[in-house]
Amino acid sequence: MMADDWRGLGAHPNAPAGGTGPGHSRLFPFTAIGRGTGFLHGQIDPHSPLGLRQAGPAAAAPAAGQPTITFGTNANRAVVSSSTLDVLKDILRAAGESKATITSTARTPQDQARAMYANCEADLARQKQLYNPATGGKVIAAYEEAKKAKKSKAEIIAAMEAKIREIGPSKVSKHCADPAVVGVIDVAPSSITHKQAFIKAVAADSRVSKFLKPPNDPAYHLEIRRARAATKTEKPKAAEPPSDIPRMEEVKDTSIDAPIDTTVAAKALAEASRNATPFVDACPG
């Protein structure tokens, strides 16, 4: 029986369950499924005379060789730039990885306190090794103090958040830094198959300014610096006059420096007095 022979009976094996709807017909053969089945990943099979389409749009497939990146529940997708994602995709391709999950991105002070609380609960000693005693270490001390006082989880996180704000969020963690300056992402180790190849690819990429990995950090922590456009502008230079216009040169009047002949001046004054017309006051007395 040929693949396009419709003499058999029954429902198409790729059709939706339920017995009705697209793909259910009395003229689908069970024994000759191949070309011309009417289904091709949710789209119309070009080889089918049926022209059937499954309900719902088909998901867009990633481009060939393009790794797939997903985001965890607590990861803010909106603050991750396309340039940061491009760096991660390059690293994934170099490591032979097809996918990765980002579990954390930029954090508010509250988010940072929540994350540090969870990590302290899991492994307090490791967190003390991870953070700078002058910054993150003080946040951990706030955790310990509140824990010792038998505060609730919400109260402990609030105390940690207050300490983070006091120190300066970006000093505690780059997760709290300006995402326009540095892109910070945590990648779930469970989403990476070739872990050693991934670590090697990250270490070889000069765009990654800092990299933390297990056991020092629960996740693969990458800090990727973003290029910023120069903001300094030069003052405009004064326009030069056209070359065909002669420049005005400063000319010094040396006549005022010449010595005055007083004898000649006196004679000229006397001659002018003799030839002058007598002045008559025309106004009545």
Image (cartoon, rainbow, N blue to C red):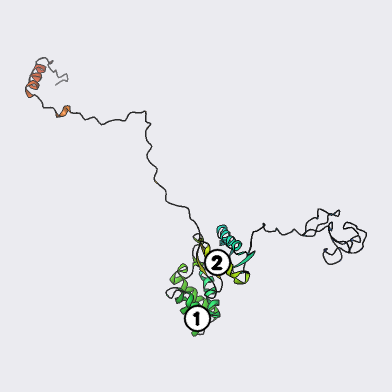
Give the vertical position of 50 relative to 238 (above or below): below
Residue 103 visible in the snapshot: no
Q: Which residue is mark 2?
A: 200
Q: What is the quadrant of residue 276 in the picture?
A: top left
N-terminal label among 2 and 1: 1
* Residue 144 image point, x, y percent: 48, 81
Distance of label 2 from label 1 (alpha carbons) = 27 Å
Q: What is the quadrant of residue 11 in the picture?
A: bottom right
Q: How many marks?
A: 2
Local SS, label 2: helix
Relative placement, left or right, of 6 versus 222 is: right
In the image, 265 versus 186, the foreground residue is 186
Relative placement, left or right, of 108 versus 2 is: left
- Identified at 56% across, 68% down, the residue is 199
Local packing at callout 2 (Cα closer than 10 Å; few below 14, some 14-19, many 20+) is few
Point out which mark residue 125 bears: 1
Q: Amino acid at mark 2?
A: Lys
Residue 90 visible in the snapshot: yes
Which quarter of the rendering shows the C terminus? Answer: top left
* Residue 261 image point, x, y percent: 8, 24
In the image, 180 versus 210, the foreground residue is 210
In the image, 41 versus 180, the foreground residue is 41
